Amino acid sequence: MKTLAAVAVIALLLLFVWERVEIIRVGYQIERLKSKKITLQRERDELRVKVLTLTSPERIARAASEQLAMVPPRQGQVILVRVPPAAPAAPGPGTPEFRLARNESGDKLP
């Protein structure tokens, strides 16, 4: 009977110790995950700034003119095309407008 009680007490002590070890292990894991979350949030913020920088209209216009030798269309190069509202390809309310530009210089586009 005493040995059964001793085994029960030892089992309870081992269960208590195991539970405490698990609590500490999970606590460390939570701290690692919090640190990783902060790192990922910083990286996300940096990527958002990079996307905003790369998609800025000024940067795109500068790259188009400097790297691709593009220029704004001259007077008469842009043709306004109105699509009638009864056309099946016209989604949404109102009359959609499309702008087309002609290349009058005769250069072939890449």
Image (cartoon, grey):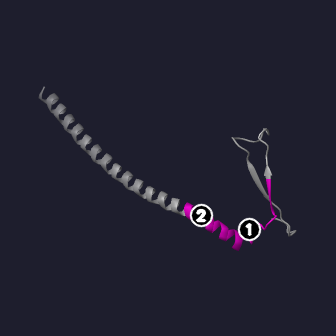
Identify the residue at horizontal 32%, vertical 46% (top origin): 26
Q: Position of residue 48 (x, y in %)?
A: 52, 59
- Does the magenta-highlighted stretch encompass residue 47? no
* Circle 1: residue type: Pro
Give how far across and how far down residue 74 sits, in percent: 78, 68
Q: Is residue 69 magenta?
A: yes
Task: Point out the residue furthest to the right here.
Answer: 106
Q: Which three-letter amino acid code belongs to the residue tagged 2?
A: Ser
- Mark 2 touches mark 1? (CB < 8 Å): no
Q: Where, quadrant-wise, is the N terminus in this rendering?
A: top left
- Going from the N terminus, do you reach mark 2 or mark 1 first? 2
**Residue at left offset 70%, top offset 68%:** 64
Q: CA distance from mark 2 to mark 1?
A: 17 Å
Q: In the drawing, does residue 72 fall left or right of residue 44?
A: right
* Residue occupying the far left of the picture: 2
Label 2 crowding class (10 Å Cα cut-off): few <14, some 14-19, many 20+? few
What span is in magenta?
Answer: 51-80
| Total residue callouts | 2
Q: Secondary structure at mark 1?
A: loop
Q: For this rendering, which residue is in front, 33 or 90?
A: 90
Q: Nearer the viewer, residue 38 or 106?
A: 106
Point 18% across, 31% down: residue: 8
Residue identified by numbered label 1: 72
Q: To which residue does mark 2 refer? A: 56
